[in-house]
Image (cartoon, grey):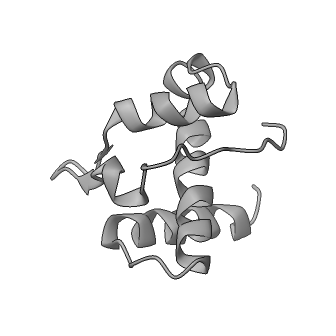
Amino acid sequence: MPLMTIRVPDGVVFADLQLRRERSGAVRFNWAVIERLCQASALDLALFQNGPEDNVAGLIVAWYVEHRRRGGDRDPVAEALLYEVQAEDTAPLN
């Protein structure tokens, strides 16, 4: 996915995503927040809803990294996602 700038609308905070992990391991979140990010950033929501799950995971992780950089609270589900993305990025290709 090409590099893009995401604008977080006023009044929206990372915790609004309500990240949670199901027993199955699936990650769930509030899609309405992603919709608001897309609207504010002039991005096509379909890139995240209909594209590979890596698209929305990358968006969430990038936002979380910036959230933490600005002093935001830790989120255990986002921490796990960040770890998973880093592990995938460093895994040797077969």
* Image quadrant containing the C terminus: bottom right
> Farthest residue in the bottom direction?
71
With 32 as the anchor, is 60 left or right in this view?
A: right
With 92 as the anchor, is 34 left or right in this view?
A: left
| Image spot of residue 69 (x, y percent) | 61, 78
| Image spot of residue 26 (x, y percent) | 30, 45
Near-viewer residue (58 or 63): 63
| Image spot of residue 19 (x, y percent) | 30, 53
Q: Quadrant of residue 38?
A: top right
At x 69%, y 67%, the residue is 91
At x 57%, y 47%, the residue is 8
With 15 as the anchor, is 58 left or right in this view?
A: right
Residue 87 vs 41, above or below: the answer is below
Q: Quadrant of residue 77?
A: bottom left
* Image quadrant containing the N terminus: top right
> Farthest residue in the right direction?
2
| Image spot of residue 45 (x, y percent) | 56, 21
